Every structure is written in C-alpha cells, then in structure tokens.
Image (spheres, helix red, strand yellow):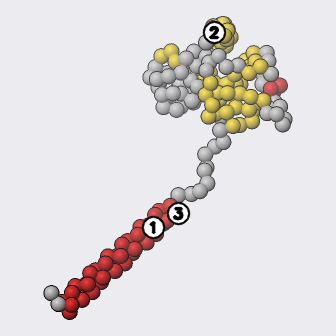
C-alpha cells in the first residue's frame, strides 16, 4: 500500500478520536452541571428539632408525673429519682394520655422496683399502656420509649436526650 493511501486513514482516525473525546467531555460537563443543579435544591441546613433538651431545674418537678407537651414526654419523680417516658404512641404516633390509677402500685421493672401512679391510653386507636410504658392492649406493636436523663453541668437543669433510648431500669438520682 502506498504512503498516500495511509495518510487519509490516519487523518480520519485522529478526527474520529478528537470528536469522541470532545463529545465525552461535553457529556461529562453536562452531567456535572446537572448534579450541581440538583444538589442546589437541597438545603444545607437541618431543620430538625434538637435531640437534647433542657427541661428545667429538678426542684420544679413535682413528685409524681409532669407532662411536657413540647417534647411529648412524661417526667416521673419519686423523691430524688427521675425517669422519662415518651408520650408518643408506638402505633401511629398520637400523643397518649395519662390516667391516674385509683391506688398506686409497685412493680418490678428490669429488676428494679417502680412505683406506678398512672397508666396511659391512646385516644386515636385505643392502645393501652401500663405505668411503665409496657403495651397492654390495642394495636400498639411495642412499649413506650424511655429516654436518658442527665443533669447539665453548667446550670443544674434536667436534660433529656430524645435520641438515646434506655432500658426500663434507668433512673436518674439527683
């Protein structure tokens, strides 16, 4: 084959390669721009509520039960001992109501004695819970959650961590 016949073939190969390279670079640039545009639709800020919340000084909590509507939480106090139980029904997330028992009962929960003064009921679908949050009846699939309580080092307020579920034997003694 002559040298003149090989030159047009090489010229076409180089032209095809450059066209493919340019097309690939253009497609990549469009893909990166599309991803950047899609990412700009998602905010960089989280609007979720904080998981740790200061509840107030322990002295402000009466013996027995106090309901905190903003946190959907029941705080129980027995002397200097506190524990927190969620007020969110495990069925569909309704807020349960506390109903006082006619006589306080004492039960053993996870090996520790617990004085029960209330039981809980869900107004949406009729789920019922014992005073320690154990589901008794209704469509609720599991017990109410217990949350970790602590005392803030800076001002001595009770702090609940709504992201830290604890076992039913958890008690905070102040």
Count residues near mark 1 (Cα–Cα under 10 Å), then give few for <14, some for 14-19, many for 20+.
Answer: few
Gap in angstroms between the C-alphas marked 3 and 1: 12 Å
Of the 4 image quadrants, the one containing the C terminus is: top right
Where does the image place residue 112, in percent across and percent down from the top left?
Answer: 66, 10
Q: Quadrant of residue 119?
A: top right
Count residues near mark 3 (Cα–Cα under 10 Å), then give few for <14, some for 14-19, many for 20+.
Answer: few
Mark 2 or mark 3: whose residue is earlier in sequence: 3
Gap in angstroms between the C-alphas marked 2 and 3: 53 Å
Residue shown at 35% from the left, 76% from the top: 21
The one of 143 and 130 positioned closer to us in this rendering? 143
Asked if disc 3 and disc 1 are in contact, CB closer than 8 Å, the reply is no
Residue shown at 52% from the left, 63% from the top: 40
The one of 118 and 73 positioned closer to us in this rendering? 73
Q: Which residue is mark 2?
A: 111
Asked if disc 2 and disc 3 are in contact, CB closer than 8 Å, the reply is no
Element under label 3?
loop
Mark 1 or mark 2: whose residue is earlier in sequence: 1
The one of 139 and 37 positioned closer to us in this rendering? 37
């Amino acid at each position: 084959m002559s040298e003149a016949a090989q030159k047009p073939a090489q010229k076409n190969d180089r032209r095809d390669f450059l066209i493919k390279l340019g097309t690939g670079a253009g497609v990549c640039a469009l893909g990166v721009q599309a991803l950047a545009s899609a990412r700009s639709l998602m905010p960089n800020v989280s609007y979720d509520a904080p998981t740790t919340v200061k509840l107030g000084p322990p002295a402000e909590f009466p013996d027995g039960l106090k309901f905190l509507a903003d946190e959907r939480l029941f705080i129980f106090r027995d002397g200097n001992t506190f524990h927190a139980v969620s007020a969110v029904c495990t069925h569909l997330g309704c807020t349960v109501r506390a109903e006082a028992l006619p006589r306080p009962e004492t039960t053993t929960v996870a090996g520790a004695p617990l004085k029960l003064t209330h039981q809980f009921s869900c107004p949406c679908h009729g789920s019922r819970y014992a005073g320690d949050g154990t589901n008794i009846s209704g469509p609720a699939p599991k017990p109410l959650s217990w949350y970790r309580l602590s005392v803030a080092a800076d001002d001595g307020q009770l702090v609940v961590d709504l992201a830290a579920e604890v076992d039913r034997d958890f008690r905070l003694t102040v």
